[in-house]
Amino acid sequence: MMLDDFLDEKPVKRKRPREASFWQQMKQALKKHKSGWSATRLESRVTHGVPDLLLLDDAGRWHLVELKTTERKKVDISPHQVAFASKHARGSCWVAVKIKNAEGSFLYLYDGAKAMDLRMDGLDTEPVLKLDSPFDWDLFFDTLANS
């Protein structure tokens, strides 16, 4: 390899997991496992902290879900998101975290009351539910609906 070839090579950028792809995966799971549910993706830049997803289950109950992705134990949840989840914790307000790394792919579900712990301690915080891939989406959605 010549020096010029080495200098011309660009570093390979690793793809980071994205919330948009997590949402697409969840959207497909909803169609397959909970066809009676309705989902709305919220893209709010006006009201900081409002969760990403508004779900209406087949019993007419609302659920708010903040979607997060990570490759390590740290979860990037903002102070606004912590404040919203904590304030609305007595309702059905959740943080769903998908981690994908060398060990595999996992899905953690936290109720809103754990948002501050999640910000401070990351995935060391005890989840309500932890799923290995392939995810048991029925269990995931039933956990939301039955709490």
Image: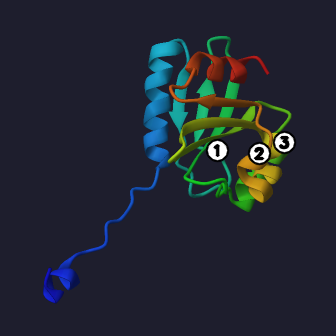
Tell me which label, 1 or 2, sits earlier in the chain.
Answer: 1
Q: Is the Cβ of the residue at disc 3 closer than 8 Å to that at disc 2?
A: yes
Residue 85 has which mark?
2
Task: Choose mark 3 or mark 2, whichever is in front.
Answer: 3
Q: Nearer the viewer, residue 1 or 90?
A: 1
Mark 1 or mark 3, earlier in chain? 1
State the separation of the CA atoms marked 1 and 3. Answer: 14 Å
Per the image, label 3 sits on a secondary structure element best described as: helix
Residue type at numbered disc 1: Pro
Residue 50 locus on image (x, y percent):
66, 48
Spot the residue most to the bottom.
3
Label 2: element kind: helix
Three-letter code for the amino acid on which mark 3 is drawn: Ala
Q: Which residue is mark 1?
A: 51
In screen coordinates, is 92 left or right of 29? right
Q: Position of residue 72 (x, y in %)?
A: 60, 54
Between 11 and 146, the one nearer to me in the picture: 11
| Label 3 to label 2: alpha-carbon separation | 7 Å
Compared to residue 81, the image places residue 37 above or below, namely above
N-terminal label among 3 and 2: 2
Residue 113 tag number: 3
